Image (cartoon, rainbow, N blue to C red):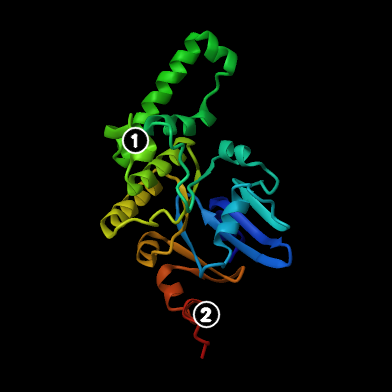
C-alpha cells in the first residue's frame, strides 16, 4: 500500500483497535486483538461461545479497561474513558439481555436516552426557564421521531415491560439511537426474534447505517450477519483468526474448524 492509500484508509477509520489484551485472573479473554471500523460501515463480530466478543464490547464501551494495547475513537485514545464519557463522545450499545427501565413508559425510556444530549441543569429545570422548555419540546419531538422510526409510536405511553419481547428489542435500539451515536454496538439484537422479526431488524440496521452510523454487530444468526455486514471479524478463544468480506470468511478453513471442531487439512 502506498503512502496516499494508507492515509486515506487511516482517515476513514472511526474506531481503531491495536494489540488489545484482557485477562480475568489467569484467563486470557483477549489476546493481541486488532482491527478497524470505517465510517458508515457494518462489521460483524463472530465466533463460538467464549470467544471474547462481549468482552471486546465491554472494552470498547468502557466497562473494563484493556490490560494492553490501544483503542482509538475518531483518532482519540479512549482506553481509560468512563462509560458516560464514551456515550458523550458518540459510542452507544444494546445488550445481550434487554436492559430497559421496566416501570417507565416507552416514551420515558427514550427520553432517558436523550439526557446525554441535553444542556439544562437541575436548577434551570426546576425554575422552568424558557431554554428548559424549548429543550424539553425538542427532546419530545426527537423521541417521537425515534419511536416512529422503529414502529413503536403508537405505544409510547405503554409501560415498557408490557411490550412483546421483540418490541422491547426495538425500544432498546431506539434508546441507543437517542444518544446520537457515531458508533453503535449491537449485542445479539436478533436473540429471541422469529424469522419475520429478524428480517425486519436487518432492514432497520441497514437504514441506521444509511444515516452514517457505524455498526459493530455480534449476532449468532449467521444468515443475518452475513447478509448485512460488509466485513466480518472472527474471534476464537480470545484471538482474531480471520477478517474479511463475508464470502471469504465463510470459506476460511480456520473459521470452519473453530465452529465445527474440524482440523484444517
- Residue in the foreground of this view, choosing between 121 and 105: 105
Residue 90: quarter of image: top right
What residue is drawn where x is 35% and y is 66%? Answer: 223
Residue 221: quarter of image: bottom left
Q: Which residue carries the number 1 mark?
A: 147
- Residue in the foreground of this view, choosing between 135 and 73: 135
Q: Is residue 129 above or below residue 264?
A: above
Answer with left or right where residue 120 lies relative to residue 62. Answer: left
| Dot 2 or dot 1, earlier in sequence | 1
Neighbor class of circle 2 (other Cα within 10 Å; few <14, some 14-19, many 20+) is many
What residue is drawn where x is 40% and y is 49%? Answer: 209
Secondary element at tag 1: helix
| Residue 73 visible, this orientation | yes
Number of marks present in the image shown: 2
- Residue in the foreground of this view, choosing between 25 and 75: 25
Q: Is residue 31 above or below residue 256?
A: above
Q: Is residue 261 above or below residue 158?
A: below
Location of residue 265 in the rendering, given as x and y in whole percent from the top left corner? 51, 91
Which residue occupies the extreme bottom position in the image? 265
Residue 111: quarter of image: top left
Location of residue 116 in the rendering, given as x and y in whole percent from the top left corner? 54, 31
**Quadrant position of the N terminus in the picture:** bottom right
Q: Which residue carries the number 2 mark?
A: 254
Location of residue 250 in the rendering, given as x and y in whole percent from the top left corner? 42, 74
| Residue 4 visible, this orientation | no
Neighbor class of circle 1 (other Cα within 10 Å; few <14, some 14-19, many 20+) is many
Location of residue 50 in the rendering, given as x and y in whole percent from the top left corner? 56, 67
Secondary element at tag 2: helix
What residue is drawn where x is 53% and y is 8%? Answer: 127
Answer with left or right where residue 89 lies relative to residue 103. Answer: right
Amino acid at each position: 500500500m502506498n503512502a496516499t492509500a494508507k492515509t486515506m484508509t487511516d482517515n476513514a477509520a472511526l474506531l481503531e483497535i491495536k494489540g488489545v489484551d484482557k485477562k480475568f485472573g489467569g484467563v486470557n479473554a483477549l489476546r493481541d486483538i486488532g482491527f478497524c471500523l470505517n465510517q458508515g460501515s457494518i462489521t460483524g463480530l463472530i465466533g463460538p461461545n467464549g470467544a471474547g466478543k462481549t468482552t471486546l464490547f465491554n472494552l470498547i464501551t468502557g466497562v473494563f479497561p484493556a490490560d494492553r494495547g490501544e483503542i482509538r475513537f475518531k483518532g482519540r485514545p479512549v482506553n481509560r474513558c468512563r462509560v458516560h464519557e464514551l456515550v458523550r463522545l458518540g459510542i452507544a450499545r444494546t445488550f445481550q439481555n434487554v436492559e430497559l427501565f421496566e416501570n417507565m413508559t416507552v416514551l420515558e425510556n427514550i427520553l432517558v436516552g436523550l439526557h446525554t444530549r441535553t444542556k439544562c441543569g437541575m436548577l434551570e429545570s426546576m425554575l422552568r426557564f424558557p431554554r428548559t422548555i424549548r429543550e424539553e419540546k425538542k427532546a419530545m419531538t426527537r423521541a417521537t421521531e425515534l419511536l416512529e422510526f422503529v414502529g413503536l409510536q403508537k405505544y409510547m405511553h405503554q409501560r415498557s415491560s408490557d411490550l412483546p419481547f421483540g418490541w422491547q428489542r426495538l425500544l432498546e435500539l431506539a434508546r441507543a439511537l437517542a444518544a446520537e451515536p457515531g458508533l453503535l454496538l449491537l449485542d445479539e439484537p436478533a436473540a429471541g426474534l422469529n424469522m419475520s422479526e429478524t428480517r425486519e431488524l436487518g432492514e432497520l440496521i441497514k437504514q441506521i447505517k444509511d444515516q452514517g452510523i457505524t455498526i459493530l454487530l455480534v449476532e449468532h444468526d449467521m444468515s443475518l450477519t452475513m447478509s448485512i455486514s460488509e466485513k466480518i471479524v472472527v474471534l476464537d478463544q480470545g484471538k482474531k483468526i480471520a477478517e474479511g468480506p463475508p464470502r471469504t470468511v465463510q470459506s476460511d478453513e480456520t473459521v470452519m474448524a473453530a465452529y465445527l471442531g474440524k482440523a484444517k487439512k
